[in-house]
Amino acid sequence: MAWPSERRSESRDRILLSAERLFTERGFDGVSIDQVMQDAGMTRGAFYAHFKSKRELYAEAISSAAKRMEARHPASTDELIRRYLSIQHLESKAGSCPLAFLVSDIGQRDTQIRETYTRIFNALAGKLGGEPGSEPDDAALRTLVLMVGGVAVARAINDADLAERVLEACREGALDQCASSAEQRLQ
Amino acid sequence: MAWPSERRSESRDRILLSAERLFTERGFDGVSIDQVMQDAGMTRGAFYAHFKSKRELYAEAISSAAKRMEARHPASTDELIRRYLSIQHLESKAGSCPLAFLVSDIGQRDTQIRETYTRIFNALAGKLGGEPGSEPDDAALRTLVLMVGGVAVARAINDADLAERVLEACREGALDQCASSAEQRLQ
DNA sequence: GTCTATAATTAGATAGAC
DNA sequence: GTCTATCTAATTATAGAC
């Protein structure tokens, strides 16, 4: 799950940071190693001293981006939902969620990458409901699908008003779901 | 919206049919013109007698795939939701919904393609609720996001049991939403 | 309209100097 | 570890024969 810390270096971290942003924004095929390395301030040749292949970089970048987002999550679930399903998230140049931005990109990749995605998905679903440690409950899955799907759809459509309406409708639905699921837990 | 019918030919339709299936399954960058033409039983050179570019083919393929699906939609909204959010839809080799399978692919494309997506999205949302002809209501948007997001997420994750649970949770949510929104319309 | 042949470009990955 | 140079392969698009 975690990568050996002895392999970390400043250059490696810079490559990873560039990769997170570029891949999340443009997908696997939309970014070349050249572009990542230029963004990180190096040339292509240096890449393979840090990563075995583009696919390995992609998997690590997704995982790392998710961890970076998680570290900035607000304590309140409601606040998380509101921030996630916001216009700001759509346009954020520094840190959008790969779960949403890459959801249909992942379905086209290999097992390793899909495992990484699954792990991230489960972690976020667990935060949204269900017993910690065990499987997320149905309400949490639905809430997360509204979040991921809402952001993905809002980004795809070419109509700012409709995008805002989609985000708002999903926000309401996700908040409702969380409220009624919290009520149930109190009973 | 519709393309000139005088441009239609049997070869053109065969190319389009291959493109629909291949693009939906693998995305824009995951399919080469060579592969589409081979699948259609021709060679690369013939492609440009029918389409101006790969991007034009992609836009037409998405639109055409959506129309083909629409033609097979069941009359009942409930039945549509059940079929959409099913394992069969995920694995269907002939006719998956580009709205779900390409949702994050589209966000990386140009205006024309995103307009096509928006039009298809609106058409399906209109079927799920709201006054015909006018804008879809919030419940319809939420329902469609559950459908599109549920299928996209289920396809991305690498855990068959979890995928089935996601589909089921979204199915229940979408059906509930539709039922209560139909009740509201009766009042 | 379809074919083969061929630009022209780009990308992932490697080799070897420093 | 980073650089430049290069290999190899794939891809979009075009040209021209039939």
Image: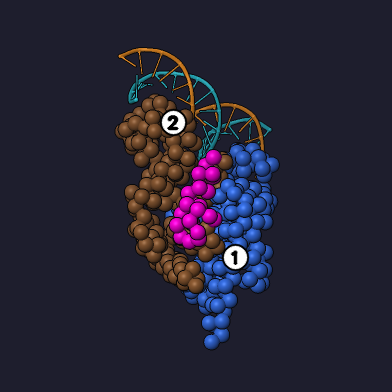
Chain colours: A blue, B brown, C cyan, D orange
Q: In this rendered view, identify the residue nearer to me: C4 or A153.
A: A153
| Residue B48 figure quarter | top left
Left or right? Give the position of A127 relative to B185. Answer: right
| Residue B179 figure quarter | bottom left
Residue found at x 58% / y 47%:
A158
Residue found at x 67% / y 56%:
A88
Main secondary-structure element of the magenta-colored stretch? helix
Residue B47 appears anywhere in the view: no
Whether the magenta-drawn stretch holds residue B118 is answered as: yes
Residue annotated with mark 2: B51
Q: Secondary structure at mark 2?
A: loop
Residue B39 appears anywhere in the view: yes
Q: In this rendered view, identify the residue nearer to me: B185 or A52.
A: B185
x and y percent of residue A71 in the render? 66, 64
A140 vs D12: above or below: below
Residue annotated with mark 1: A171
Region in magenta: B112-135
x and y percent of residue B115 in the render? 54, 44
A29 vs B84: above or below: above
Left or right? Give the position of A17 relative to B20. Answer: right
Give the residue at the far front of this rendering. B187
Residue found at x 64% / y 65%:
A82
